[in-house]
């Protein structure tokens, strides 16, 4: 092969590689790609891993009411563990298993539990707006029966857009008649009812705040 022909082949190769690189960059920066939301960093202690932790507040920044903790708790061990508490900013979340009731949430061996969202377990902060502010990163402490305390950072975000279905199910209404006890505040107990699903009327029950809707 002559020297001039070799130079021509080399130039063509470089040009084709440049086109491929530019195409890859274009594909990686289009609108659809940029809309992908990365997961929150995971925190692992022993057999327990906590991922995608968020504190989801009322959609209206001026509204008072409960907030919820949304996260996925993985148990990589050979025995079930109980999630006994979630603490944030000096208050403890009210835990409700996916099947209803109240109290500890079982994280099965080799499995996981999702907190927040329809039909999932829930963790409700009765005084959400008073405890956290949107846009902050808040430290959460998860307490498990065997592993003990696991700390994780969580974004504080309102229940809008992507997170609308994961926010507090007790949302204040502009009209006094449409909100519990005639106000936008939770009931006196500040605790969710025993069920993780809304009442049949579509309004918050007398118990106040609960998540999972």
Image (tube, grey):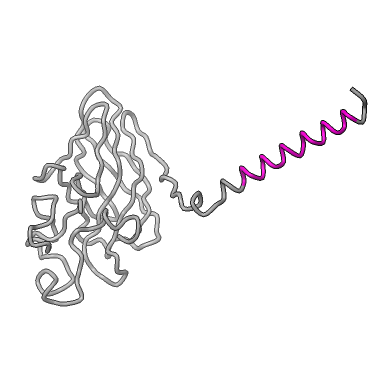
Q: Nearer the viewer, residue 152 or 178?
A: 178
Relative horizontal placement of residue 89, taking residue 6 as reference (left or right): left
Q: Nearer the viewer, residue 141 or 207?
A: 207
Image quarter where the C terminus lies is bottom left
Relative horizontal placement of residue 194, taking residue 67 as reference (left or right): left
Q: Nearer the viewer, residue 159 or 78?
A: 159
Question: Is 191 situated above or below 5?
Answer: below
Magenta-drawn stretch contains 13: yes
Residue 69 is situated, as x and y percent measured from the top left of the image, at 27, 51
Q: Residue at x 29, y 60 (%)?
A: 57
Residue 131 is situated, as x and y percent measured from the top left of the image, at 28, 61
Magenta-drawn stretch contains 115: no
Relative horizontal placement of residue 115, taking residue 181 as reference (left or right): right
Most common secondary structure along the magenta stretch: helix
Residue 1 is situated, as x and y percent measured from the top left of the image, at 89, 22
Residue 144: image quadrant is top left
Q: Residue at x 30, y 60 (%)?
A: 159
Relative horizontal placement of residue 95, taking residue 33 as reference (left or right): left
Q: Nearer the viewer, residue 107 or 23?
A: 23
Chain part drawn in magenta: 5-25
Question: Is 66 situated above or below 86?
Answer: below
């Amino acid at each position: 092969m002559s020297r001039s022909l070799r130079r021509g082949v080399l130039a063509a190769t470089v040009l084709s590689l440049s086109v491929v690189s530019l195409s890859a960059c274009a594909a990686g920066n289009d609108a659809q790609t940029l809309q992908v939301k990365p997961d929150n960093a995971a925190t692992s202690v022993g057999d327990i891993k906590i991922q995608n932790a968020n504190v989801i507040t009322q959609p209206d920044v001026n509204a008072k009411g409960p907030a919820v903790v949304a996260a996925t708790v993985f148990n990589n061990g050979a025995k079930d563990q109980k999630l006994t508490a979630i603490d944030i900013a000096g208050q403890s979340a009210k835990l409700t298993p996916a099947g209803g009731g109240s109290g500890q949430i079982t994280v099965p061996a080799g499995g996981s539990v999702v907190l927040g969202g329809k039909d999932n377990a829930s963790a409700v902060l009765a005084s959400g707006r008073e405890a956290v502010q949107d846009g902050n990163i808040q430290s959460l402490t998860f307490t498990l029966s065997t592993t003990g305390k696991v700390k994780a950072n969580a974004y504080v975000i309102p229940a809008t857009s992507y997170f609308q279905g994961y926010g507090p199910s007790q949302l204040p209404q502009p009209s006094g008649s449409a909100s519990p006890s005639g106000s936008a505040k939770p009931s006196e107990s500040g605790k969710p009812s025993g069920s993780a699903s809304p009442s049949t009327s579509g309004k918050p029950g007398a118990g106040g705040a609960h998540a999972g809707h």
